[in-house]
């Protein structure tokens, strides 16, 4: 629960910092679903066309794992992620929206699975491309697609060349600018 405590501490700090950060549309809170971010919540800060963010994710265990397919079962999954976005693309001249709709995202995530007998730790590097769909000036939906390069930290038996293979990376989030 330490990553969740750090995340909540950062959010509390940002809310207590006053109007210098908030009220300018530079900070966004988000909730979403993704691989490897899991079911997640996050906070992002915008600097011109760039944006940085952090997030915390969770996914519940698959079950008891006592049946014949127990090797497919997983324990509770937790993830801590950091992202760097670069927004680009033209807006129509008649648009009153404040964002460039397309973005390139470089994400880093640390994921941990807790099992009865061991912990599995995985590091992900996720380059993606995505698009923000603005519903209003403050609320929108972000969808992105890319590839996850995986490195197994807790299993030294996985050869290095196999630990960098790509898995699909996909995410969807709802965000609200503060």
Image (tube, rainbow, N blue to C red):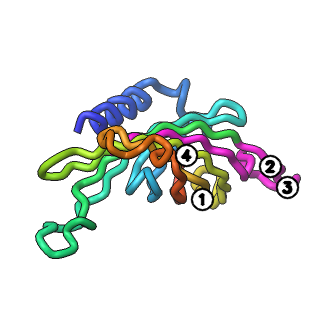
Q: Which residue is mark 2?
A: 89
Mark 2 Cα within 10 Å, few/some/many (few <14, many 20+)? few
* SS type, badge 1: strand
Q: How many marks?
A: 4
Q: Position of residue 57 (x, y in %)?
A: 36, 49
| Label 1 – label 4 distance at C-alpha | 14 Å
Disc 3 or disc 2, which is closer to the eye? 2
Which residue is rendered at x = 41% and y = 48% of the image? 41
| Label 3 – label 2 distance at C-alpha | 10 Å
Q: Position of residue 128 (x, y in %)?
A: 62, 50
Q: Which residues are magenta?
A: 87-111
Quick one: label 3 or label 1, which is nearer the N terminus? 3
Which residue is rendered at x = 31% and y = 43% of the image? 155
Magenta span contains residue 105 = yes
Q: Which residue is mark 4?
A: 126
Q: Nearer the viewer, residue 149 or 8?
A: 149
Quick one: label 3 or label 4, which is nearer the N terminus? 3
Disc 3 or disc 4, which is closer to the eye? 4
Q: Which residue is mark 1?
A: 143
Q: Which residue is mark 3?
A: 92
């Amino acid at each position: 629960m330490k990553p969740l405590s750090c995340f909540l501490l950062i959010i509390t700090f940002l809310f207590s910092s006053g109007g210098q950060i908030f009220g300018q549309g530079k900070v966004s809170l988000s909730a979403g679903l993704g691989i490897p971010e899991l079911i997640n919540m996050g906070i992002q800060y915008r600097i011109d066309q760039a944006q940085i963010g952090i997030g915390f994710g969770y996914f519940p265990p698959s079950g008891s794992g006592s049946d014949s397919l127990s090797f497919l079962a997983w324990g509770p999954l937790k993830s801590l992620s950091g992202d760097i976005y670069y927004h680009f693309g033209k807006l129509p001249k008649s648009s009153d929206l404040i964002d460039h709709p397309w973005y390139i995202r470089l994400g880093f995530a640390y994921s941990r699975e807790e099992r009865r007998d061991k912990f599995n730790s995985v590091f992900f590097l996720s380059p993606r491309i995505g698009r923000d769909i603005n519903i209003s000036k403050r609320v929108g939906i972000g969808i992105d697609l890319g590839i996850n390069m995986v490195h197994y930290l807790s299993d030294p038996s996985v050869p290095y060349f196999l630990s960098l293979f790509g898995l699909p990376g996909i995410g969807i989030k709802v965000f609200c600018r503060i």
